[in-house]
Amino acid sequence: MSDANLDTREERHLVFKVLKATLEALGSIVGRNTELVLHDLTTPESSVMAIVNGHISGRTVGSPILAGPKQDLGFAAVLQSPAGAENYDPVVIQDYPTTSISGGTLRSSTVVFRDANGQPYASLCINADLSGITAAQACLAQLLGDAPKVEPKVIEQPDMELLMTEIIQAALANSNTPNKSMNKKAKLEAVRQMQERGIFIVKGGVEKAAVALGVTRYTIYNYLDEIRALQAVSSRKD
């Protein structure tokens, strides 16, 4: 046995140790829909050295390489990798569709490792089962339906005249007294309610309130002065 062969075996052994540790680390965080498989390509009849989420393909440690997904491009990479000391870089095949033995749709990626002599000897495979995601998308589509495009809603400016009328009518209704029969106390309360709703900061509010209460606009100003004075006394007591 040559020194070169001894060096290659040691190299392979070290890489397998690194890949097993990598698989263990990745397996601790990936979801249950992602299968990770480490193959020893020199023993195809029992190539699976380590596996995470083997329920996706039904494989376990010691399963043959042919038990993997259908249409696996990793096989082609192994067969097409030219041998030679100058060709020892890993071969990466990214994101290709495969089919599980049960017929499920998978997305796969494979890395094929070659030794210093250019011989492929290991592969790390990632198989993501998309059936659950596809089912979830279909469910959401049914729940949401084909939602029409929402156009920006044009908000019409409120009619200030109508708003002031509504505020005045609400204040008069709360007095339980027809405006012609309202005493000063009732009118003060009506003005207070109008004030709370901000009618008097709107142009024309004082005039409209005066007409509704049957008083002059100056009377409204006097009522407002009285209300402010009462509020000031109340706040001092508190």
Image (cartoon, rainbow, N blue to C red):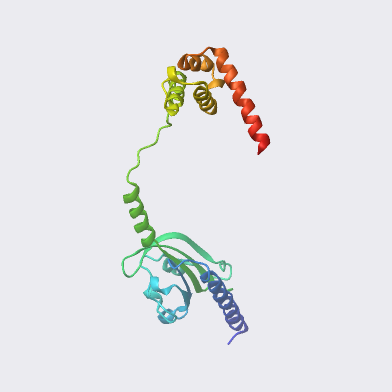
- Where's residue 77, x and y in %? 46, 66
Q: Residue at 36% of width from left, 52% of height from top?
A: 140
Left or right, 226 with respect to 65, comes to right
**As rendered, which of 62 and 132 lies closer to the eye?**
132
Q: The C terminus lies in which quarter of the figure? A: top right
Q: Residue at 57% across / 81% down in the picture?
A: 9
Name the image quarter holding residue 72. bottom left
Please, which residue is most extreme toward the bottom here?
A: 1
Which residue extends farthest right?
236
Tell me residue 206's x, y (percent): 53, 16
The residue positioned 52% from the left and 18% from the top of the image is 205
* Residue 118 makes an appearance in the image: no
Give residue 15's position: percent from left, percent from top.
58, 75
* Closer-to-camera residue (163/98): 163
Q: Nearer the viewer, residue 23 or 163?
A: 163
- Of residues 164 and 154, the one drawn nearer to the viewer in this rendering: 164
From this view, report whether residue 38 is shown above or below residue 129. below
What x and y, as percent, mark residue 195? Answer: 54, 25
Answer above or below: position of 11 versus 167: below
When the figure is inspected, residue 171 is found, relative to residue 56, above or below; the finding is above
Q: Is residue 140 left or right of residue 229?
A: left
Q: Tell me what residue is drawn at x 58 percent, y 78 percent.
A: 17
Specify the quadrant that holds the N terminus: bottom right
Q: Quadrant of residue 89?
A: bottom right
Q: Is residue 197 left or right of residue 58?
A: right
Residue 97 visible from this viewpoint: yes
Q: How many marks?
A: 0
